[in-house]
Amino acid sequence: MQSPPLSPVPRDRLICQMPKCYTAESCLQYKTHFDAQVKSACQQRHAGNYGLKMSKVVMVGDLYVGKTSLINRFCKNVFDRDYKATIGVDFEIERFEILGMPFNLQIWDTAGQEKFKCIASAYYRGAQVIITAFDLGDIQTLEHTKHWLQDALKENEPDTCFVFLVGTKKDTLSEAECEQTEQDALKFAIEMKAEYWSVSAKTGENVKDFFFRVAALAFEQCMRKELEKNSHNTAQIGAGNLIQLEGNPSENKENDLQHSTNCC
Amino acid sequence: MDTEQEDMSPETALDKDPFQMTVEDVYDMSHVIGKDLMKISKEARGVTDLVADLQFKIVRVLEVLETLVNQSSLATEEMKMERDNLKGELERLVKESPQADQADLGPDKMVIDLTDPNRPRFTLQELREVLQERNKLKVQLLVAQDELQCYKSGVIPPTEDHIVTLENESIITSSPRGNDNSKDKSAIRRLFSPFRQDKQAQQ
């Protein structure tokens, strides 16, 4: 079943190499290349049979830290100085082509105002990426990121989400001030098991690099899962175990292990 | 009203309720009494001294009355002003701090000013529904924009091979049509339309 064509992904949304992290002190993975298995699967276009990949990203954080501005800078390349509170939630869909494969990010922008929390939190579910944003110029908003993360994690399966901690409004600080705040933020990031980034939606500094990193990591994870599932299916046929129970990943891992020991 | 009062004879001042009395009424009475005293002294020459004596006393009483009435109406005026000030103050406080009202009603109650055009009037559920509707329409818009892009670039958009859905209101999914794996179908709201997928476009 070959899929029909679709409109081409814009030239500035092509990713061929794993984008670098912001700082090695707090990053989700150090390697500078895509997973070799993923790469070869993409080259062989095997993945074409799996359907369009789409990852869900949820952006959380205090009001007025610039969540919407950050998304607007990346998705629309605009910056509006005036503050307009987000009502409940909003979203954007951003199309990429990674290692020659089409890939979509659905980026959910949530309201930071307390009164919308009960609405926004309904959209945390099924996130592959959680971005917790804070204002580099307001240390309190950094302290609140822990609560935001907790709330978002509560709605998701444990250890299924990539977490990013993003300091915004980098343009409003001197280099020295920024470095100092980053030291504090890195401690938070490590505790939160998050990858750290400093950005400015106003100047655009690091915005594209950041979202490319998000997209690449989310894509790689998607592909890895897909490949795992596939090898698992073949393994089952080999093991004569045709009935598969859904849902328990640890069990699946055990089956995989069993199979490999049987083989050898 | 004013012209009526001017036409009224000064004698009516004597019939007034003492608490409604003004200084003008006291002057009217003084006028009436003065006229009577003049009449008496004209009629009987012998009593002139007596009348003059009485006149002094009466003037004194009227002066006392004048002072009292004056003071009382001033006090009334002051109290009226004070009352209006307090009323204004109260209204201002009610408007500025709805908290104060809440304290009276208990922590979970809120007072809504029905004359405020910005008063809260929609429910959370209504907002939720509007947002869901907006999200659904935005997905449709994105799909349509992409399809348009297809036509513009001379690529024929795919027919119905993929559907884009808004699952559980918060997860957008794209899945092949006719897929037997229908575990989530009941929860899926089909949003129509193809989300084209592909690789040949780049070649």
Image (spheres, coloured by chain):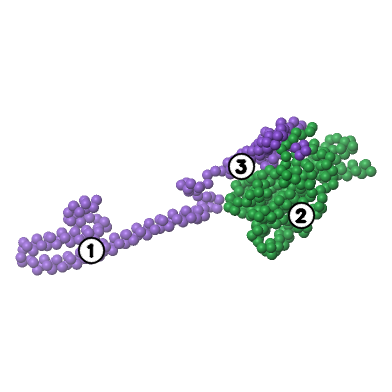
Chain colours: A green, B purple
Q: CA distance from mark 2 to mark 3?
A: 35 Å
The location of residue A132, given as percent across then percent down, is 69, 53
Along the viewing direction, whichever of B147 and A144 lies nearer the viewer:
B147
Residue B10's image quarter? bottom left
Residue B69 visible in the shown view: yes
Answer yes or no: are tags 2 and 3 on the same subunit.
Answer: no
Kindly identify which chain the residue marked by label 2 belongs to: A
Sort mark 2 into few (<14), some (14-19) or many (20+) by Cα contacts within 10 Å: many
Which image quadrant: the N terminus of chain A?
Answer: top right
Dot 3 amino acid type: Leu
**Residue B201 screen position, x and y as percent:** 75, 37
Task: Please name whichever residue, B191 or A71, is drawn nearer the observer in this view of the structure.
Answer: A71
Is residue A225 visible in the rendered image? The answer is no
Q: Secondary structure at mark 1?
A: helix
Which of disc 1 and disc 3 is earlier in sequence?
A: 1
Q: Which dot, 2 or 1, sits closer to the camera? A: 2
Under mark 1, the amino acid is Leu
Residue assigned mark 2 = A21
* A76, A254: nearer the viewer: A76
Q: Quadrant of residue A206?
A: bottom right
Residue at image position (71%, 32%) is B156
Looking at numbered disc 2 in the image, what kind of residue is underneath it?
Answer: Cys
Tag 3 and tag 1 share a subunit: yes
Does A34 sit above or below residue A182? Answer: above
Q: Residues within 10 Å of mark 3 (few under 14, many from 20)?
A: some
Tag of residue B131: 3
User: Relative to residue B69, is residue A107 drawn left or right?
Assistant: right
Residue B128 drawn at (x, y percent): 61, 42
Circle 1 chain: B
